[in-house]
Amino acid sequence: MKKLIINCDDFGWDAPATQAILELGAAGQVSSTTVMANFAPAADLRALARLASPTLSVGLHLTLNAGQPLSAASAVPSLVDDKGQFYASSQLWQRYLRGQVRREEIKQEVAAQLRRLAAAGLAPTHADSHQHLHQYPLLGPALLGILRELGVRRVRRLTATGRLDGRGLVLQVFAASSQLALRGFATPGALVSTFSTEAASAAGFRRGVAAAFRQASVVEFMSHPGLSERPGSPLMRVPEYEFWRGGAASEILRELGGELVSYAEV
């Protein structure tokens, strides 16, 4: 039987995302989430720890490109601007390509984010990254190497299955650049990101999952649910939340010959 992980990214990013994920996880309508450790309040981490189980996996949504580090800014100066904030993705990547980012500082911050989850009683089953940093050319292999050194054994495999837009094609090129670095990690065979480019719907879910199941026996569906939209974000969070809450995904998944699993089963 084919296996599907429904992973909700961005736990901790803001209250509407966090509350949506907690509700969907408690109802068994999603099977995994990844945490932005530098954003999530301690109370929300404790609430998630109470829900975490073999059927609801919790991982790290590695964040080096939004907000501020858990490490002191003075300890990771190559990662932050003059206000102590992380650089945006493109800036971070360009700085890395120019040799302006120190690997030891990246490792220090990644370790701090993993420790924050552990301190809340969460043992991360896997990792992915905000805006797919772990599969950027050159930077991605470095991040994957650090995750491996810190004991992470499962990661997201970026494939942008079903995405034919410009960003989807760029992501596919990025994904190809880090394939060798993924060796040694357990990963789903395909990633469905359909809801990143269209409002969530039964038709979109069916189309994306069916296409991915033709490529792989274990598939991850990337989701960003929320109780409200986030200003400035292209994501359509409310339709995703409403779709998962409606329960149609379970019936469609059965029709496609699949079952819902967590990252713990990868």
Image (cartoon, rainbow, N blue to C red):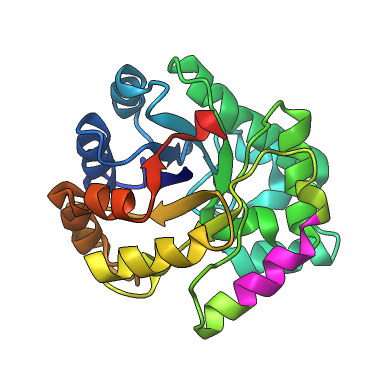
Is residue 143 visible from the viewing direction of this image? yes
The quarter holding residue 150 reads top right
> In the image, 90: left or right of 17?
right
Q: Which residue is farthest right? A: 99
In percent of the image, x 44 and y 30: which residue is there? 57
Residue 147 in the image: state x and y as whole percent.
Answer: 71, 36
> In the image, 76: left or right of 23?
right
Question: In the rendered view, would you say 95 is above or below 151?
Answer: below
Q: Is residue 236 shown in magenta? A: no
Main SS, magenta residues: helix
Q: Nearer the viewer, residue 145 or 246?
A: 246
Residue 3 in the image: state x and y as whole percent.
Answer: 47, 43
Question: In the rendered view, would you say 102 is above or below 192?
Answer: above
Q: Nearer the viewer, residue 181 or 76?
A: 181
In percent of the image, x 81 and y 47: which residue is there? 102
> In the image, 155: left or right of 45?
right
In percent of the image, x 30 and y 22: which residue is there? 51
Q: Nearer the viewer, residue 70 or 242?
A: 242
Is residue 9 visible from the viewing direction of this image? no
> In the image, 141: left or right of 15?
right
- How many numbered circles does the render carry? 0
- Which quadrant is the C terminus positioned in? top right
In percent of the image, x 19 and y 33: which residue is there? 27
Residue 62 in the image: state x and y as whole percent.
Answer: 57, 44
Stretch in magenta: 170-179
Question: In the rendered view, would you say 216 is above or below 117?
Answer: below
Residue 26 in the image: state x and y as whole percent.
Answer: 22, 30
